[in-house]
Image: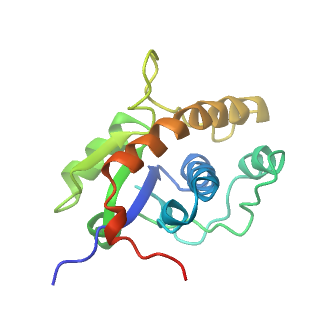
Amino acid sequence: MAKERSYITFVCTANICRSPVAEALLQRALVAQGEALSAIPVISAGVTAFNGDRPSMNSVRVLEKLGIDISAHRSQCLTQEIVERSFAIFGMTANHCIAIETQYRNPPAHVYLMRHFMNNTFEKEVPDPFGMAVETYEACHHAMEEAIPSIVEFIKKEYPLHESKHRS
């Protein structure tokens, strides 16, 4: 029996800096779009993550400034099941996308860099801020925040909303 491909999944390395921030940013943006889009499940994972790690403190701090709390997030490793349940997966770097396409069976048709849909931008990758100063995390957050509108537009055009589970 085929699994429903409903997740929008963000992938980074350890699932403690970039992908949980991207997950939270997209969830906030989808909620602002209304009920149909807010019902879309958004998750994150890491290609080499340990399960259960807390998000980096600088990622938590950067999002706190926006009124978003990711302190309860716990890391998870990307699994075959997550890949098979994903409608689209957004990697932070080309290496993340290559890992998804080569290390997992049956990846979704939609595997992209997070900044893939942005026009007029040279840098498509979101570099890892791990261990850097908070200013580096802020720059990373800004790079992800810039990409969110183009991802929302992609979802509006491509996601099978008529099949998504709507909240009652």
- The correct choice, above or below, for 80 with respect to 62 in the image is below
- The correct choice, above or below, for 33 with respect to 151 in the image is below
Where does the C terminus fall, quadrant-wise? bottom right
Could you say which quadrant of the image residue 48 lies in? bottom left
Where does the N terminus fall, quadrant-wise? bottom left
* Residue sitting nearer the eye, 114 or 39: 39
- The correct choice, above or below, for 158 with respect to 149 in the image is below
- How far across and down, in percent of the image, does residue 58 sit? 76, 45
- How far across and down, in percent of the image, does residue 123 sit? 46, 20
Q: Is residue 125 left or right of residue 71?
A: left
* Residue sitting nearer the eye, 39 or 83: 39
* Residue 55 shows up from this direction: yes
Residue in the image at 60% along x and 50% along y: 29
Q: Is residue 112 left or right of residue 141?
A: left
- How far across and down, in percent of the image, does residue 106 sit? 16, 62
- How far across and down, in percent of the image, does residue 86 sit? 33, 63
Image colouring: rainbow
Could you say which quadrant of the image residue 141 lies in? top right
- The correct choice, above or below, for 3 with respect to 138 in the image is below
Residue in the image at 65% along x and 31% along y: 142
* Residue sitting nearer the eye, 132 or 161: 161
Q: Is residue 139 left or right of residue 68?
A: left
* Residue 49 shows up from this direction: no
